[in-house]
Image (spheres, rainbow, N blue to C red):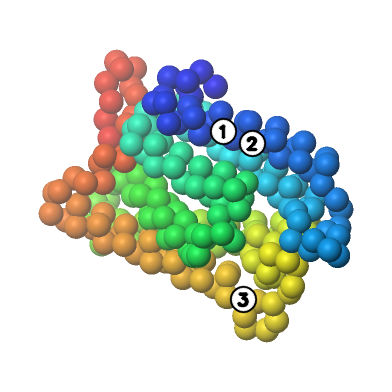
Amino acid sequence: MKKIFNKPNFIKFVFITMILSSVFVTVKMIMAPTVAPLHNPDIRVKSDYFLMLLQCILGTFAMLLPGFTERRLKVSIPTNMIFVYSVFLYCAIYLGEVKNFYYRIPNWDMILHTFSGAMMGALGFTVISFLNKTEKVPVYLTPIFVAFFSFCFAVTAGVFWEFYEYAADGILGTNMQKFGAEDGTLFVGHYALTDTMTDLLVDCIGAFAMSVIGYISIKYGKNWHERFMFKRKNNENNRDSL
């Protein structure tokens, strides 16, 4: 946790927001009705707040993940990458769930999925670039292969996220896949699949855009992607690109 408070103010702000939101949502969940009253069907019920609480708790642990990764893998994660990661968590969890932007702001979910596809694509570049530079891998990976791996990595992460949403909706009775309206009205047929398929589509768009940027960066030596690359810490405290 000390790592968090050594980071820029916005990153500390997001971490504190996640903790305070968890407390706030817990109190609201205790006070909320189990079923919405007929005279006010739009009121939030316990299951709504339970989803918020789950997301806030996951967000709190997600903010600790970079520090854990740095310690376990002996790497240094660029502040730029942690900043972008924190912006995404703030927009997805606090603004999206707690402030209800998913329903208040048109296409908020679509914007975030596009952003996350690009972000996971950047992470894919980090992983494959490490393998490409290590002496333990006796092959040279071409820029097109690195870009393709990055795209597949990001899309696979998006698919697993949809698995998580589907499981949460089935087990906890939430509406993460937006198969129903905010007032509880269930969508029917093809329309019920719209949110999931749109999420996967924009995941692919974001991942493809990052793959193209990464390809150009590697192919033509632009080094744009290196701003978000992990750095390895060796015994002499020197750092090589991961």
Mark 1: secondary structure: helix
Instruction: Name the residue beneath numbered marker 2.
Output: 21
Instruction: Name the residue beneath numbered marker 3.
Output: 193
The CA span between labels 1 and 2 is: 6 Å
Observer-nearest of 241 and 42: 42
Q: Horizontally, is 90 left or right of 204 in the view?
A: right
The CA span between labels 3 and 1 is: 32 Å
Q: How crowded is mark 2: few (under 14 residues within 10 Å), some or many (20 or more)?
A: many
| Of the two numbered discs 3 and 2 in the rendering, the one whose residue sits closer to the viewer | 2
Instruction: Name the residue beneath numbered marker 1.
Output: 17
Q: Where is residue 179 in the image (x, y as percent from the top left)?
A: 67, 70
Q: Position of residue 120 (x, y in %)?
A: 42, 52
Question: Could you tell me which residue is drawn at 83 percent across and 59 percent down?
Answer: 36
Q: Is residue 90 in view?
A: yes
Q: In this view, does 6 lie above or below 60?
A: above
Q: Is residue 189 above or below residue 73?
A: below
Residue at the extreme top of the image, as rendered: 236
Placement of the C terminus among the 4 image quadrants: top left
Q: Horizontally, is 173 left or right of 19 in the view?
A: right
Question: Could you tell me which residue is drawn at 38 percent across and 66 percent down?
Answer: 205
Q: Which of marks 3 and 1 is nearer the N terminus?
A: 1
Q: Quadrant of residue 23?
A: top right
Q: Position of residue 156 (x, y in %)?
A: 50, 60
Mark 2: secondary structure: helix
CB within 8 Å, label 3 to label 2? no
Mark 3: secondary structure: helix
Q: Position of residue 188 (x, y in %)?
A: 70, 81
CB within 8 Å, label 1 to label 2? yes
What residue type is disc 2 on?
Ser
Q: Residues within 10 Å of mark 3 (few under 14, many from 20)?
A: some
Question: Could you tell me which residue is drawn at 56 percent across and 33 percent down?
Answer: 17
